[in-house]
Image (cartoon, grey):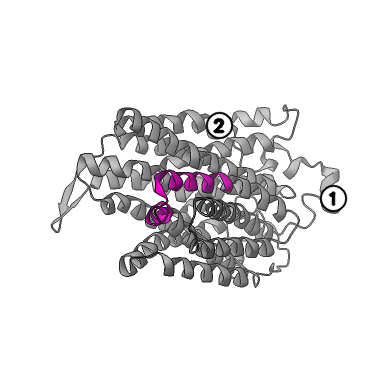
Amino acid sequence: MVNPAHRLAHRTPFFFGWVVLSAVCSSQFVRNAAASLTIAVFVYPLSEQLGWSRTMIAGAATLGGLAASFVSPGVGWLIDRYGARIVLAVSVFILGLSTVSLAAATATVSIAGFTVPIAFWLAYGTGRVLFSSPLQIGASVVVSRWFIRLRGRASGILTMSHSAGMISFPLVAGLMIGSGGEWQRAWIALGVIAWAVALAPVALLVVQRPEDVGLLPDGDSAKDDTADGGAGAAEPEWTAKNAMRAPALWILATGTGALFLMQAGTNIHAAAYLRDLGLGQTTATLGITLNAAFLGIGGLAWGWIAERVPARFVMAAVASTMAVASALFITVDSVSEALAYSALFGFGLGGMLSVPPVAYADYFGRRSLGVIRGVTEPFSTLGQAIGAVLMGVVFDVSASYYWAFVGFAALGALTGLAVLLARPPSLERQPDPGPRSIE
């Protein structure tokens, strides 16, 4: 069956890449059905009505994140081999299915004397794998292939769509649970929303690369492409094998993983930290909302900067922003400070999401980008898994988050220095074996 996008590509009055961007943005919006902020809304009603401990509930997210670390390399290969459209469409369908099934996922089993909510772990864990791997990698790879000169702002728009979902999905779930107390209907609603918003766009409008429909990145013409600064002026064409030999790849991946470690630890425990300070539930909720909102604003701002400043310098600035915000959290003693520092941290998170995809594509080109992203994404998912647990351990041992924030501030500063070492690697141009090669 011919993708309808092939017939539409030359009929829009503007560059068709913006249509493709809108389609993949829908997948970033709905992946928040499995976001940590979304499941946070369900923790209380699940623990109250089913008698599950909060550790049992959170375990689903941890298992899903760890599983995503193992499947990401295979996902990257599938994207390069079969195209992001199929990967994204299947992922959105399964995400909706797994989310809807959570309404009935109450079965438990006894393992070594411990009660395990096996159905819930399988259903939510599946959604978490999709959240962290195919939906994340697929969307960013498509954007990086359709845009080169405008890659930064396109990546920022993608981050903003994720920010909108971060706000919307917990809000919908919270309102449904609060009005009727039926968390089952809330899960069903979130799954249906995922299907309604994203399934058709990603299935019908996503194209792997502009050349597949006779276009060039950024909407350039053939004449523009040969001019200085054109879309194809000096784009590197690294194979995955050669990219994995470049130290810069692993510096970027490790630095990104460190930032995700800070993100997961801070975001999951931020509300509890503000409550511990006596600032109240309203302040904690506003802090989380500002974090999500400024993540979107930051994504646009950092993406715009990344078009004008080398990516390693922008990543260093992002890491420094997150380090400063972590240090400032230690000093919070008023509502205004709590909200301001939450917004600052969210602004940094926008860069954490939008800048690394730009850096990978700028450094290694579009040719094997799916595989390259697949082998680097485990650093991010492992960072998230470690950060969430580490923050909790520090609190359990010291009855305070003080040393966790100190450690995060130091980690952010070190990360900022480390990524400056990730100079763009050089590679002599090699014969192109064809668009399907993932050597």
- Find residue 11 and report its horizontal and vertical position in percent: 72, 26
Asked whether residue 222 appears in the rendered view, the answer is yes
Residue type, numbered disc 1: Thr
- Relative placement, left or right, of 219 versus 39 is right
Q: Amino acid at mark 2?
A: Pro
Is residue 274 found inside the magenta-colored segment of the image?
A: yes
Compared with residue 5, is residue 431 higher up or lower down, i.e. above or below? below
The C terminus - image quarter: bottom right
Which quadrant would the N terminus be assigned to in this image?
top right
Residue tagged 1: 226
Q: Nearer the viewer, mark 1 or mark 2?
A: 2
Q: How many marks?
A: 2
When asked about the image quadrant of residue 242, the answer is bottom right
The residue at 62%/72% (across/down) is: 417
Q: Which residues are magenta?
A: 268-294
> On the image, numbered disc 2 is attached to which residue?
201
Q: Position of residue 280 (x, y in %)?
A: 40, 48
Q: Secondary structure at mark 2?
A: helix
| In-image side of 349 versus 288 (left or right) | right
